[in-house]
Image (tube, grey):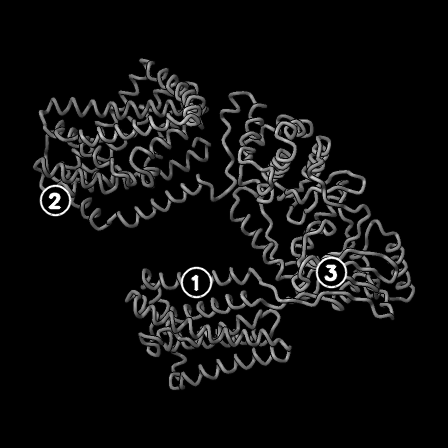
Amino acid sequence: MTDQIRAASPHDAADHDDARADVRDGHAAGATPVAVLSRPPSAADPHIDDVPPRRVHDFGDLFRAAGAVILAAVVMLSSIYLSGITTGVESDAHTAGQALNWMVDLPVSMLQQLAIVSIVVMALVQLLVSREWVQTAVSVLALFAGLAVAWALSVAVSGFGDPSLVAALSSPNNPVGSTLLPDFYAGAAALLTAAGPRRTRSAVKWGWNILYTVGALLVVLSVNSVAGVLVSFAAGRLSGMLLRFAVGTKNQGTWGAELAQALQGIGITVTSLSRRVDVGGDTSHRTLRASLDDDLVEGSRLYDVEDDRGRRFVVSALDAQARTAGYVRQLWQWIRFTGVDSRRDRSPREATQHHMAMMLGLHNAGLPTPDVYGVADTGETSILVLRGADAMHACNLDTLDDDDAVALMRFLSVANRRGYTHRRITPDTLARLESGTPIIAGWHNGDDASTPASVALDQVQLLTLLAVLIGPDRAVAAGRDVWGDDTMVALAPFVQKAAIPSATRAMDEWDRHVLDDLRARLRALAPQDVAESMEPVTLSRFSVRSFVGIALLVVAVAVVFTQMKPDEIIAAVRNANPRMALVCLALGLVAWLGSALELGAFIAPERRNPLGVFMSQVAQGFAMVSMPAGVGPAFVNLQFLRRSGYRNTAATAIMSAVLAVYYGGTVVMMLLLGLFTGSDALRGMIPTNTLIVVVGVVLMALAVAMMVAPVRRWVVGRVVPLVRAYARQLLDVLTNPKELTFSILGMLVLNVATGLGFWVALLAFGQPTNPIETLFIFLLANALGSALPTPGGLGGVEAALAVSFGAMGVPAGVAVSATLLYRVVFYWLRIPLGAFAMRWLDRRNLI
């Protein structure tokens, strides 16, 4: 009965009648309904026209080869930079293996030879018995290739490798030289890889078990090192995978009579089974194409089947090896996109059953889909059986009109309202029924219970495709008719290149300005203030913004772990006067207050959040660790202003006003302090000739660019209006006396507190100096050191302060110690506090 239920279709009354009859007869005989047998097959032999299995290049082999390379690289790097961990692992293994000391007397070479002979004989005999002649030869070649790669790698590492790496890979039985790596593991791993997969061949499975056991045993007995065994394993896997991919492997799917037998399990007694192939060109290399008959399943084999009752079916067979490419594509989408759910069907069974559930769900929602009869699974193949009442055919994209666009959007709208999303709407997915109604096909990559972001991506993909085919204006008009203006406006942040499938971007009608035009039309539907505040939604993990963020994080980590020098810092802090160190810390807090006053003065009272402004200045401590000095604070201020409700132009103007007040005020302070103290430290501060050359080159490049008519028109039409608007905003900000006065006051508090912080750091080591002269020298040295394009001026600030105060007469040791104490308070200690502030601001949507 289970088989009949799986095969049942709401469009097949005969199946329902037969199922009820089978159940009734079963009860009459006193049998349990579950035990009812399927209809016996026809006595006549079925007509089977199938294409013999051929060797396929499984892309999964390439990814496994890449995994082997990564494993070897990780082991080698760990051996060099984490030698303590690798040594500890080996020590623990040797300690645990003391109970096996009685085996030390056994001849190791005999054990290795016995193991590899057993592995080779087992694997090759099974291949020969199965008449896998090509794979047998490939397996032997892989054995030799693994041994050769291990030998070459041993020679290379011994001759050019790091001494720590050589020491980690070597062992008593494998000294330096061509025998550095135990080639036994590489050869056996390469052979088993080429003879696999292990899930279909028992000899290969037992061969791997033997190899793992022998490897662990020899490591415990100190015969081989952990690193040497792992690298040798990786070398063998790499050799075997590359050779297996190059030669190809036999398709392990279900074919011919086995396929007919699998269909018998869902109530189809096959009388005729015929394979669909593309016979254009060389018939020896016939290819498979995605067909609308099975809803565009990628990599499937299509069959036309007729059973003993005269029913006709379309059978779609999806093999595990052909499914690998689809799974890798799904995995890439999952890695690439952020905030958007993606399916990851590991096996063809998962993919087929999910596809069937999608089609049944869409059919239940009232949408026309292929009629699903049932699903069968056998071995490495998953089988989907379909029967179409209203066949689909490809849509002629050249004849698409506005009514078709509306119909397609309504089709998608019905699916989206039920939670179904397509995820990959491309030109191939646009189809028509026999009645001429346009529909969307290819739901095998879709999903249910979808999030609003996934629904928006579907809508953007269809809208963009229609914009390419019929133009942005007509596509937007159709979208407004079906989805409404509010939905259309909400789609604007999702209109990005990352959201559009490559098949759409490969169309001849595609233009790189399509997205810009479409986004502009969607923004035009929104009020001006809403349109200007729109920011693109982060979709791709590998966008420019995310790449910069990751790069800055890497820089920050590298700075912290490579430049911190904890021994020197701890020594400096330990020798400092505790009271003066606390005063220095208090001045750091005052500097934050001054910075907050400098920014907050320009923020309108109704938008000013005093605690948020202060925390934004604290957060700059984390941004500075991954950005050059000055860039981090500007970035944090700009993001905070945007989240506070300012448009891009206004936010940029306020940020620029803050920078103008800070840098202008700092220069004026240095000039006044230099004149007041009578110091000649300003002499040679500005390299006149260099400055003139730089200014001349910039102006000349600008003049040459303006000679080009297109550049001149672009500057006049695009750049000049933006500059005028920005300059107007900046002038409005700077001409408010009250705001400007408070901002200047904040700048003075910031600079004075920071300079006095270094003066107190000198006092912490018993070095009294003139506070005014110290403030001047500090501002000058800090400005010169911050010009170095390193995170927070790291290295440059320390060197400038130590050298400047050393020239002032401060002992070199005291100058260095004071510099380290100052940087602990005003740089290193701010990193964790800034990270906390960043998190606080992010939770409140303030950055």
State the SS at label 3: strand
Q: Amino acid at mark 2?
A: Gly
Q: Are marks 2 and 3 in contact (CB under 8 Å)?
A: no
Q: Is residue 641 left or right of residue 278?
A: left
Q: Nearer the viewer, residue 813 or 709?
A: 709
Above or below residue 420? Residue 736 is above
Q: Say which of marks 2 and 1 sits in front.
A: 1
Please report the residue visible at 42 percent of the width from the left and 25 percent of the height from the top: 709
Mark yes or no: residue 89 visible: yes
Q: Tell me, yes or no, whether the two marked residues, 3 and 1, touch with CB atoms within 8 Å.
A: no
Name which of mark 2 and mark 3 comes first in the sequence. 3
Within 10 Å of disc 1 (Cα), the crowding (few <14, some 14-19, many 20+) is some
Report the residue at 37% width, 67% height from top: 89
Q: Along the polypeptide, which appears first: circle 2 or circle 1? A: 1
Q: Relative to residue 667, is residue 273 drawn left or right? A: right
Q: Which residue is mark 1?
A: 71
Q: Tell which tag, 2 or 3, sits nearer the viewer.
A: 3
Give the left or right position of residue 741, taking residue 527 as reference. Answer: left
Disc 2 designates what residue?
Answer: 813
- The residue beneath circle 3 is 376
Q: Secondary structure at mark 1?
A: helix
Q: Alpha carbon of mark 2 to alpha carbon of mark 1: how far? A: 47 Å
Between disc 3 and disc 1, whose residue precedes?
1
Quarter of the figure with the N terminus: bottom right
Residue drawn at 76 percent across, 68 percent down: 257
Q: Position of residue 515 (x, y in %)?
A: 55, 33
